[in-house]
Amino acid sequence: MAQVERATSSGGKQYLTRLLSNFQYVSGSNLDYLGFFWWSPSGGQAYNLTLDVQANIPVGFVVTSAKVTLFHSPIYWIDTSDFWGYSRNVRLYNTNNRKGFYQTQSASGLEFSFFTDETLTEITNAFGPSGFTAATPVGTTAVNEIVESIDITDEIQIGFNRFVIGTGDTLPAPAEAYAYYFARCGNAHATLDIIGYQG
């Protein structure tokens, strides 16, 4: 916490009147896949994997700053022909149907699940006008990157908030070779920092 302002009494004593609080909300405890993915046990299915950040803002809380920090690490896929994968054209989305979305999950052991019946609205230029695309690794040298979004205070509402981080590229039908999808998938983690004070 940090001091925002002070009020001085007639006796010369100072009292804190407002304190800044920094609430952090994360996409998970570990790095997760971000981008296109190919899952062969399901018969060959392409997926667009995203990150999810949820935040609950208490009544009366005044938000002064809100930003998403994205940590990205490329993946070195080992196969008959080894290659790098990294996230591309990453965008930030707000979910408008905060109370109506639900999860779908295969009972056959498929590890991926998805939220459906929701509307995603892109936050314009959140990671720049072209989104965030990780640097292309060279040889066996990779660079982890940290990128910060613009201030999204205007997107925060009192109560439940849900943001999705994902590629803005269109997922092609599962006709491409699996390496096409893996090459467009990296590891990532997102943190939403909301700074403000209780009004």
Image: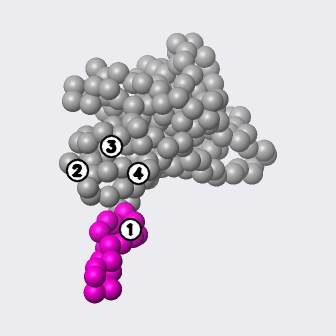
Circle 1 sits on which residue?
Answer: 5
What distance separates the C-alpha of mark 1 from that of mark 4? 14 Å
Query: Gap between marks 3 and 1, in whole Å?
Result: 30 Å
Task: Identify the image quadrant of the N terminus.
Answer: bottom left
Above or below, comparing residue 26 to residue 121 in the picture: below
- The residue that mark 4 highlights is 64
Disc on the earlier residue, 3 or 4: 3
Label 2 packing within 10 angstroms: few (<14), some (14-19), many (20+): few
Q: Quadrant of the C terminus?
A: bottom left
Q: Which residues are magenta?
A: 1-20
Q: What's under tag 1, amino acid-wise?
A: Glu
Residue type at mark 2 is: Gly
- Element type at marker 3? strand
Task: Give how far across and how far down residue 78 sits, in percent.
Answer: 64, 41
Kind of residue sitting beneath label 4: Thr
In the image, what residue occupies the spot 64% across and 29% down? Answer: 130
Observer able to see residue 182: no
Looking at the picture, tell me which residue is in the foreground, 174 or 22: 22
Whole-percent x, y for residue 76 in the image: 64, 44
Q: Earlier in the sequence, mark 3 or mark 1?
A: 1
Rendered image quadrant of residue 177: top right
Is disc 4 surrounded by few (<14), some (14 to 19) or many (20+) residues within 10 Å? some
**Residue 61 visible here:** yes
Task: Find disc 2 in the rendering and name its residue.
Answer: 60
Q: Secondary structure at mark 2?
A: loop
Which residue is the site of mark 3? 54
Q: Which mark is residue 45?
A: none
